[in-house]
Amino acid sequence: MRSWLVAVVVLVGCARGADDPGQAKDTCRLRDCGVSVGGQETDPEDEGVPPEDTGAPPADTSVVVEDTGTPPKDTGTPPVDTACTPPSGAVCSTFPQCGCASGTNCDVTDYTTGKTSCVMAGSKTPHQRCSALGECARGNTCVYDVCMPFCGTTTDCSATAQCRPVQYVEGSVTKDVPGMRVCMESCDPLNPSKLCGASTTCLFSSPTTTTCAAAGLSTTAGSCASNPFTCAPGYVCVNTGDCKRWCRVGFTGDCPGGKACGTLSTKPKIGGIEYGVCAY
């Protein structure tokens, strides 16, 4: 069974086959939701995007290839605290970890209520790919098909991560999973391998925040229509299923061959810089 994750505000969701990937069209099922994208790609002429630069573009330093390296060690993995007391009525606590026997992990098994249960603990650490409940090491859970540490506040995470609520889409409504928070890396969409693990990428989880998520190998039109996780690192699924490369609007060197960087309807930004996608 695939990891269940959900929507985190505008840009992540379960919109498979939607006209605008920023809008969920189906109901998420437990550990069977995928990441959507930054929104509908807009027409550069309508958005005032400057015409393609016909001059020789600077060397492209943002080419992203499949990351086969070992991800950096995440020092924000929550400690196992055997002295903590699970919340009233709960079997166990996800953070700090307690209430479960050695070799097992307290994880959320009902996303609508936040119910926790003791499941077998896996061996995968933060940023490693996962596909099912029970694959991640104790104190971690599978979110966007990537292992992420549970947390209470951002101080429980590494210096490059933020403690954010996990969300799911029900119909067209985005909801928080009660009491479930994880450390999400604040990564660079153009250079996901700097913080994210092997076979993962960096996507916007809101118009101003990013997170690591599973990635594939696709870079072409129509290649992510059925699964937004199929786009290669550094690419994002837009429109009705096209894998396109991330770029910064107004930075001609981000797209190969001097191609234009088109805008997205959601206009995601990092540090005031707007991100879009390269034209084919």
Image (cartoon, rainbow, N blue to C red):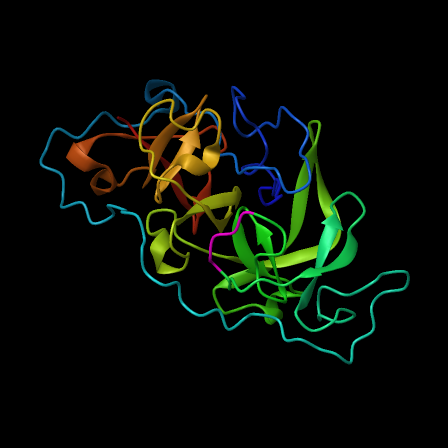
Where is residue 157 drawn, in percent x and y? 57, 68
**Horizontally, is 264 left or right of 45 in the view?**
right
Figure disc tally: 0
Residue 189 vs residue 219, the one in the foreground? 219
Residue 155, given in percent of the width and then of the height, sits at 60, 71
The residue range painted magenta reads 127-131
Instruction: Indicate whether residue 177 is drawn in magenta.
Output: no
Res 259 quadrant in image = top left
Magenta portion: prevailing SS class: loop
Corner quadrant of residue 3: top right
Q: Is residue 65 left or right of residue 151?
A: left
Residue 161, given in percent of the width and then of the height, sits at: 52, 62
Residue plotted at (74% across, 45% down) = 111
Residue ID at (62%, 58%):
182
Q: Is residue 239 above or below residue 252?
A: above
Say above or below: 144 vs 237: below
Q: Identify which residue is drawn at 61% across, 28% down.
A: 24
Does residue 38 appear in the picture of this structure? no
| Residue nearer the viewer, 63 or 214 | 214
Can residue 233 be seen here? The reply is: yes
Specify the quadrant of the image occupied by residue 180. Answer: bottom right
Kindly give the residue lying farthest to the left in the view shown. 56
* Horizontal and vertical percent position of residue 129: 47, 52
